[in-house]
């Protein structure tokens, strides 16, 4: 009888509501896909209407993910929307999982940057003209088929494009009207027009952390719902 009482007490102790719950697994381990690399950036907003959230960069070593750094992040002024349903000019940040083709900036690359880094010149433009064959591409000199009011003259964004990473949204096979020029860049004065932005110091740290041999990607999403970051 005494043995049964001891066992029962032990079981009650284990089931006690005061017992500390196990901490959740790191965010990348709860995602549906991280595209196989060993570096990942997550940019998570509380909900689709949010213009601010958290960005964290992660390393995968020994089969587990651990955070390498984190910063407050800004999103589009009109929040976030599923990348496959996004419409250009809506000031929304596309959710999804994307590669990071290359970095660029008006300023020099931070010492130790390993990703390909392209310096902005006075002739650098990013074409967003749906009628141009250069749609969603960097050009040196404004092409004849890309209207200036449908393009970004990169050098004029001295604060935001001091340093940046191209996000591979609608990049490999661009769909006209879905959107162009989506970057991870330095904070401006407020929310973005659809990009993700972080403080200047965080952007520099990300550039020196990113290793192209480890296939870094970025996952953008919300805390829950159809655009939950864990669905990507």
Image (spheres, rainbow, N blue to C red):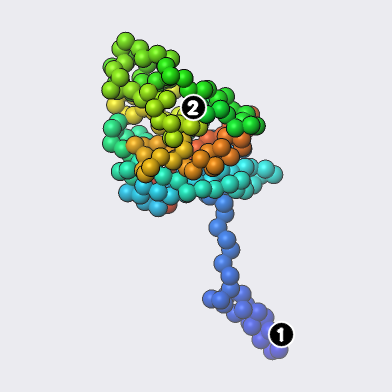
| Front residue of this view, candidates 24 and 199 | 199
Residue placed farthest to the bottom in the image?
1
Whole-Å distance between the Cαs marked 2 and 1?
74 Å
Disc 1 element? helix
Q: Is residue 150 above or below residue 12?
A: above
**In this rendering, position of residue 147 left or right of residue 1:** left
Is 22 or 101 nearer to us in this picture?
A: 101
Is residue 198 in view from this perspective? Answer: yes
Q: Residues within 10 Å of mark 1 (few under 14, many from 20)?
A: few
CB-based contact (under 8 Å), mark 2 and mark 1: no
- Compared to residue 19, the image places residue 148 above or below, namely above
* Residue of label 1: 3
Extreme residue toward the top, this view: 144
Q: Position of residue 117 (x, y in %)?
A: 55, 25
Vertical position of residue 161 compared to residue 187: above or below: above
- Which mark is drawn over residue 18? none
Q: Give the image location of residue 104, x and y in percent.
A: 50, 27
**Which residue occupies the extreme right position in the image?**
3
Q: Residue at x 63, y 42 (%)?
A: 60
Is 136 or 229 nearer to us in this picture?
136
Q: Is residue 80 left or right of residue 64?
A: left
Query: Which residue is denoted by mark 2 in the rendering?
Result: 106
């Amino acid at each position: 009888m005494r043995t049964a009482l001891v066992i029962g007490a032990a079981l009650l102790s284990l089931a006690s509501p005061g017992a500390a719950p196990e901490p959740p697994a790191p965010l990348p381990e709860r995602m549906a896909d991280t595209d196989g690399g060993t570096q990942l950036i997550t940019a998570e907003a509380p909900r689709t209407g949010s213009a601010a959230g958290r960005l964290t960069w992660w390393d995968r070593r020994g089969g587990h993910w651990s955070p390498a750094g984190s910063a407050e992040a800004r999103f589009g002024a009109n929040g976030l929307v599923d990348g496959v349903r996004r419409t250009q000019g809506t000031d929304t940040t596309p959710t999804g999982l994307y590669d990071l083709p290359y970095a660029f900036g008006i300023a020099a690359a931070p010492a130790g940057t390993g990703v390909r880094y392209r310096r902005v010149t006075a002739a650098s433009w990013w074409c967003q003209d749906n009628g141009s064959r250069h749609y969603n591409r960097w050009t040196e000199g404004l092409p004849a088929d890309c209207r200036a009011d449908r393009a970004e003259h990169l050098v004029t964004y001295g604060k935001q494009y001091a340093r940046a990473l191209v996000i591979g949204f609608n990049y490999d096979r661009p769909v006209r009207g879905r959107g162009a020029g989506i970057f991870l860049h330095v904070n401006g004065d407020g929310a973005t027009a659809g990009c993700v932005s972080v403080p200047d110091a965080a952007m520099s740290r990300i550039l020196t952390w990113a290793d192209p041999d480890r296939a870094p990607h970025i996952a953008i999403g919300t805390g829950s719902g159809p655009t939950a970051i864990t669905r990507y």
